[in-house]
Image (spheres, rainbow, N blue to C red):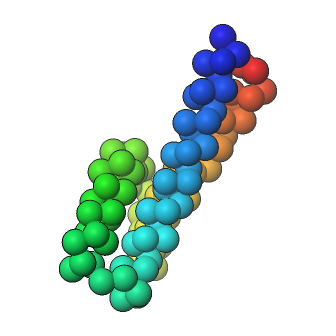
Amino acid sequence: MQSLGILIASAISIFIWVLIASAIFSWLIAFNVLNARNSVVDRIGEILYRVTEPALRPIRRFVPYIGGIDISPVVLILLLIFARNLIYEYWL
């Protein structure tokens, strides 16, 4: 049972890093550091979008944009850290 808890906690940690990468990637495209018309950049952006969007979509329904900034990744990261800490405290 401990191995399953470690696996779930590790998956949560990896998903947190994917969320951070997705947010940074979107900023780089928004500030024209990366060219979105490049096929490699487009492919990476699409992969990050497909991985993170199903988890972010429900949060975006309840959390409004603040000054044009989407804070749903921050809310999701905080929820995931809370879940990971629960796993560490009660399951491991």
| Residue at 31% from the left image edge and 72% from the top image edge | 41
In the image, residue 33 above or below residue 68: below
In what quadrant of the picture does the C terminus appear?
A: top right
In what quadrant of the picture does the N terminus appear?
A: top right
**Left of 1 or right of it: where is 36?**
left
Count of numbered labels shown in the rendering: 0
| Residue at 40% from the left image edge and 45% from the top image edge | 55
**Left of 1 or right of it: where is 44?**
left
- How far across and down, in percent of the image, does residue 69 sit? 45, 74
| Residue at 62% from the left image edge and 50% from the top image edge | 78
Q: Quadrant of residue 26?
A: bottom left
- How far across and down, in percent of the image, does residue 10 sit? 61, 36
User: Is residue 80 at all visible to an observer of this figure?
Assistant: no
| Residue at 65% from the left image edge and 22% from the top image edge | 5
- How far across and down, in percent of the image, does residue 8 sit? 58, 28
**Which residue, as the protein is rendered here, is positioned at the far front?**
40
**Left of 10 or right of it: where is 33?**
left
User: Is residue 21 at all visible to an observer of this figure?
Assistant: yes
**Which residue, as the protein is rendered here, is positioned at the far bottom?**
32
